[in-house]
Image (cartoon, rainbow, N blue to C red):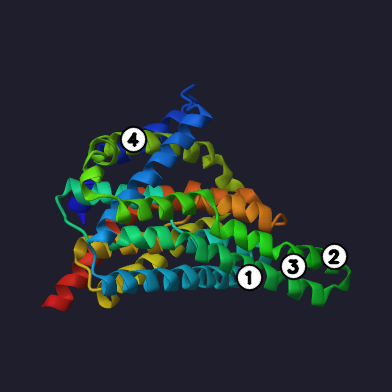
Amino acid sequence: MMSAFSNLLIPAVLFFALGFIARLIKSDLRFPPDLAKILSIYLLVSIGLHGGVELANADLGEALAAVIWALVLGFLLPIIAFGLLLAMRRVEPLDAAAIAAHYGSVSAGTFLTAIAFLSSQGIEYERYPLIMLAVMESPAIVVGLLLASWSRSRAAKANASRTTGTERGQSHLGDILREAFTNGSVVLLIGSMLIGAIANPTAMESLHPFTTDIFMGMLCLFLLEMGLEAGRRFGDFRRVGFALVSFGLVMPLIGGVIGVAVGHLMLGFGVGGTTLVGVLGASASYIAVPPAMRLAVPEANPSLYLTLSLGVTFPFNVVVGIPIYHYLAQLLVGWTWS
């Protein structure tokens, strides 16, 4: 385990720490808003193209299995998160539904950091998790909407005076579902993957400097900006409360264990691929899901789900979680081969 932690001393993670510390010491370091968006777009396009190239060369049966299990994780994890939050009795059901949607979706930043972690150790990994990354965005949003609708229905039965709010949520459900499946990050990931899959292989070689050579440098800048944002939300811990902070640390461990089990036992991946599926199960979205929840569940408190996903779970996964999921993957793969 100690060697795994020492291997996190890679530029991508250190740049995240730099951004976090810069905000804590009240440095005037800032990212232009448009630059942060450009970095996000670049990373989504790059990983989508990589996934498409691998998909073009992939076995159809294995690719289909990865998609199916991505859907299973996308639907299962938010239900688990919602149940835990209700059992804690610390948040309202609509807040719980919005938070749960974040923990069923995925974090591209965490996934990319895991790739950097594996690359720093020379560990090879299957490319199917890239396909799973693109697939897991929307299902959790849909589940979050359904949980919110269920919560509204229960509240309406308990208090007839709230039927107006219920009708509003139902009348907009079609638009909300459309938003979930046409979200910009989802379109970029799936669209780039399709381009990478159908484009001429020779032509794709010309994109190598764009998709590979500058990738880690762009990732460092992205994590620097994420460190600044996480540092900005560090003070929100007091408002979130100890119980919710505990959820932000425990839920990724639950998702990570489930992801590791799926990665190796169900999909047959090696240590690298199993680690990445564990990271997918453990991560929480902070790009695709927040806009959808703001539109779909306006009653939910954004400071709760943003602070948990970006201020608690993202730093935990980057610094502590990834080595844990890698260690679990090593144990599971070693055990099944022994």
For mark 1, what is the residue?
Answer: 146
Task: Please tell me whether residue 153 is drawn above or below residue 10 in the rendered image.
Answer: below
User: Total number of numbered labels?
Assistant: 4
**Which is more foreground, mark 1 or mark 3?**
3
Q: Which mark is residue 275?
A: none
The span from disc 1 to disc 3 (Cα, nearest Å) is 10 Å
For mark 3, what is the residue?
Answer: 170
Q: For mark 1, does the 10 Å Cα neighbourhood hold few (<14), some (14 to 19), or many (20 or more) residues? A: some
Q: Is residue 5 left or right of residue 16?
A: left
Q: Is residue 101 left or right of residue 157?
A: left
Q: Earlier in the sequence, mark 2 or mark 4?
A: 2
The amino acid type found where label 3 is placed reads: Gln
Q: Earlier in the sequence, mark 2 or mark 1?
A: 1
Q: Quadrant of residue 157?
A: bottom right
For mark 4, what is the residue?
Answer: 218
Q: Earlier in the sequence, mark 1 or mark 4?
A: 1
Q: Disc 3 on helix, strand or loop?
A: helix
Q: Which mark is residue 164?
A: 2
Quarter in which the C terminus is drawn: bottom left
Given contact means CB atoms under 8 Å apart, are the residues at marks 2 and 1 in contact? no
Identify the residue at image location x=24%, y=65%. 58
The amino acid type found where label 4 is placed reads: Met
Q: Is residue 140 left or right of residue 146?
A: left
